[in-house]
């Protein structure tokens, strides 16, 4: 029999919001770390400060936002039933914050016990999270390219976690594991298998919805996640001995697949029916252009081996991917999700007798626009700072400011929500 | 087998197009034009709601016995969208670009997720539970949608 469950499955607002409101402050921490450490942090991807800063962004900013978004998105967009979302969020959210703090401290101090404690925190939090979300994603009867992408993304999260724990233990116990090679596999699964997969799955859904674009073609929507998964599996065998040519080929194929998704997104947005362009569109386009730039940078590094072998080359790629693609797209998405969820919950509370504030009254468009330009400035400075070290500290500060502004904007949106909610309650 | 809800799906797209034009006119500050386009949008959406609420939903409820379920939820969402269009009208009368943009943005996201719920969940349920009377009902739905809609030809 038909089920009407997916009509009304949105979790309480507090479930995604605790993640959303925390995420930007990890960005602030990463920016301040760069401002404090200065140019050494960008000299190579392997310095303790670079590893600490990277994980403040990927396991702090990105993971918080993505975990929160999935708890909201899975029930609403796929009809999947998440078991006790309030309870899950109450455990996973603080555990992740503690685990990131421990991991960053571990990188900066190199104390083995910190690596072990961080691993334990991530393993418990993400293991539990993956089981709960996985059950919802695999049991939903619905079928769509989005669901396939989200399922693969969750596998990507688990593999990233497993490799991360292995690496942590390797660092703690000084084992003879090929740590550098395993790090590449860990990073590929984290960025390509989890983050990009999730971004693609969500984009299939929201890009046509927010901008009234044509839908993604079916072959691309289904093909990109599967191709990425296949390439990730091949990439995972690389530590067991492959020539450099194969390595480059797999990397470029993966980035080419990502570039195809980005190019299609830009093409669809170019054909959007909506004539007004909002700030969300600017963020999304910047993210997609960064993804295309990532592909071309990698091609350039292969064509010019002297440049490609510079230790700054991977830092450039990482900056483009983490800040350019993911922090940017998350920032833009939060500007749609938070005002809309505020409005959605308020209109349910107030019935048909009063009008809740509209989305733009939660966060004014001109404020979002200004924060976008600050974020763009931060991204540009960070990218230039990779090659022009004197810019490292100012770039870190500007990035911290841009993230803080995002955090403040989300808090003001919440305050608009709370003010109106309290008014409804007082009137009732 | 004909798809009962085909014309309603097309009509969603038609309403989207009218929305886009009205929103663009307001963004340009062309308020007289906006008034014309907004009234066209309001009429089209009202036709859509009326068609669903007076023809499709009662038939679905009679066929399935599900009176308090998804159709009731859709009716509540219709009421909310009418209010948002009302907010857009007030903003247009007051020539307030910010207020119009806020209500329009909210209507767009709400309307899109409403349409997705209908197109992905409710319409397929209607298509299968009303298959026996699809021919007659499809023609009624088609005729009830407003005359300007390109699906009507």
Image (tube, grey):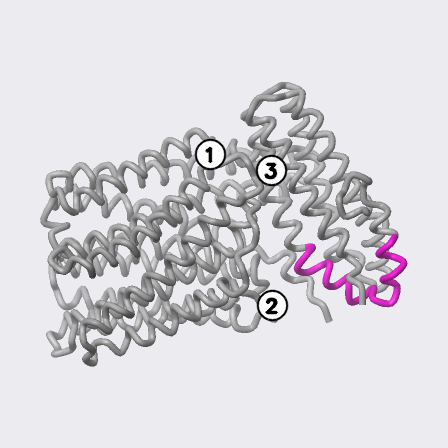
Front label number (3 vs 1)? 1
Residue B126 percent across, percent down from the top left: 78, 61
Query: Would residue A164 be seen by someone viewing this image from the given angle?
Result: no
Residue B45 visible at all: yes
The first of marks 3 and 2 along the sequence is 2
Magenta part, dominant SS: helix
Q: Is residue A204 left or right of residue B69?
A: left
Chain under disc 3 = A
Within the image, what quadrant is residue A352 found in? top right
Answer above or below: position of A63 versus A274: below
- Image quadrant holding the C terminus of chain A, namely top right
* Residue B121 drawn in magenta: yes
Q: Mark 2: which secondary structure?
A: loop
Chain of the residue displaying label 1? A
Mark 1 surroundings within 10 Å by alpha-carbon count, few (fewer than 14), some (14 through 19), many (20 or more) = many
Q: Secondary structure at mark 3?
A: helix
Which label sits on residue A142?
2
Pointers 3 and 1 within a single chain: yes
> Label 3, on which residue?
A425
Along the line of sight, the residue nearer the viewer: A381 or A69: A381
Tell me which numbered mark, 3 or 1, is placed earlier along the sequence: 1
Furthest-bottom residue in view?
Answer: A240
Q: Which residues are magenta?
A: B118-139
Q: CB atoms at circles 3 and 1 under 8 Å apart?
A: no
Q: Which residue is mark 1?
A: A363
Residue sitting at 65 percent across and 37 percent down? B19
């Amino acid at each position: 029999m038909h089920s009407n469950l997916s009509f009304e499955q949105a979790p309480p607002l507090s479930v995604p919001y605790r993640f959303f409101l925390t995420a930007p402050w990890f960005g602030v921490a990463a920016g301040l770390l760069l401002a404090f450490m200065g140019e050494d942090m960008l000299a190579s991807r392997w310095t303790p400060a670079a590893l600490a800063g990277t994980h403040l962004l990927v396991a702090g900013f990105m993971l918080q936002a993505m975990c929160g978004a999935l708890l909201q998105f899975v029930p609403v967009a796929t009809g999947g039933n998440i078991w006790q979302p309030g309870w899950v969020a109450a455990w996973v959210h603080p555990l992740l914050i503690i685990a990131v703090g421990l991991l960053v401290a571990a990188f900066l101090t190199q104390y083995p016990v910190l690596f072990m404690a961080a691993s334990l925190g991530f393993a418990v939090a993400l293991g539990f999270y993956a089981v709960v979300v996985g059950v919802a994603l695999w049991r939903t009867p619905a079928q769509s390219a989005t669901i396939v992408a989200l399922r693969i993304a969750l596998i990507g999260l688990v593999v990233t976690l497993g490799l991360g724990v292995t690496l942590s233990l390797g660092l703690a116990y000084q084992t003879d594991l090929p740590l550098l090679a395993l790090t590449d596999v860990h990073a590929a699964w984290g960025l390509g298998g989890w983050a990009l997969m999730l971004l693609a799955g969500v984009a299939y859904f929201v890009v046509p919805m927010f901008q009234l674009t044509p839908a993604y073609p079916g072959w691309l929507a289904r093909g990109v996640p599967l191709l990425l998964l296949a390439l990730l599996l091949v990439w995972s065998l690389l530590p067991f001995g492959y020539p450099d040519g194969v390595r480059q080929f797999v990397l470029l194929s993966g980035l080419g697949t990502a570039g195809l998704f980005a190019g299609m997104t830009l093409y669809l947005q170019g054909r959007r029916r909506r004539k007004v362009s909002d700030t969300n569109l600017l963020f999304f386009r910047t993210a997609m252009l960064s993804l295309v730039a990532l592909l071309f940078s990698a091609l350039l590094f292969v064509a010019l081996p002297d440049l490609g072998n510079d230790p700054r080359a991977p830092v450039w790629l990482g900056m483009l991917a983490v800040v350019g693609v993911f922090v940017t797209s998350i920032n833009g998405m939060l500007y749609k999700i938070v005002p809309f969820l505020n409005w959605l919950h308020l209109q349910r509370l107030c019935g048909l007798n009063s009008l809740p504030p509209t989305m733009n009254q939660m966060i004014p468009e001109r404020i979002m626009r200004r924060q976008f330009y600050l974020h763009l400035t931060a991204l540009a400075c960070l990218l230039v700072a990779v090659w022009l070290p004197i810019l490292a500290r100012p770039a870190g500060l500007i990035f911290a400011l841009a993230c803080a502004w995002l955090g403040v904007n989300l808090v003001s949106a919440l305050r608009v929500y709370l003010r109106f909610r309290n008014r409804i309650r007082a009137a009732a | 087998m004909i798809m009962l809800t085909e014309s309603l799906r097309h009509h969603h797209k038609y309403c989207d197009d009218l929305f886009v034009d009205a929103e663009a006119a307001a963004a340009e500050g062309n308020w007289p034009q906006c008034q014309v386009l907004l009234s066209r949008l309001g009429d089209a959406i009202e036709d859509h709601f009326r068609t669903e609420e007076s023809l499709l939903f009662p038939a679905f409820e009679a066929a399935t016995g599900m009176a308090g379920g998804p159709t009731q939820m859709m009716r509540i969402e219709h009421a909310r969208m009418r209010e948002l269009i009302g907010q857009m009208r007030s903003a247009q009368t007051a020539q307030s670009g910010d207020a119009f943009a806020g209500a329009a943005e909210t209507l767009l996201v709400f309307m899109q997720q409403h349409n997705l719920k209908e197109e992905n969940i409710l319409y397929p349920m209607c298509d299968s539970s009303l298959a026996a009377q699809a021919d007659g009902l499809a023609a009624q739905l088609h005729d009830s949608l407003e005359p300007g809609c390109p699906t009507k030809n």
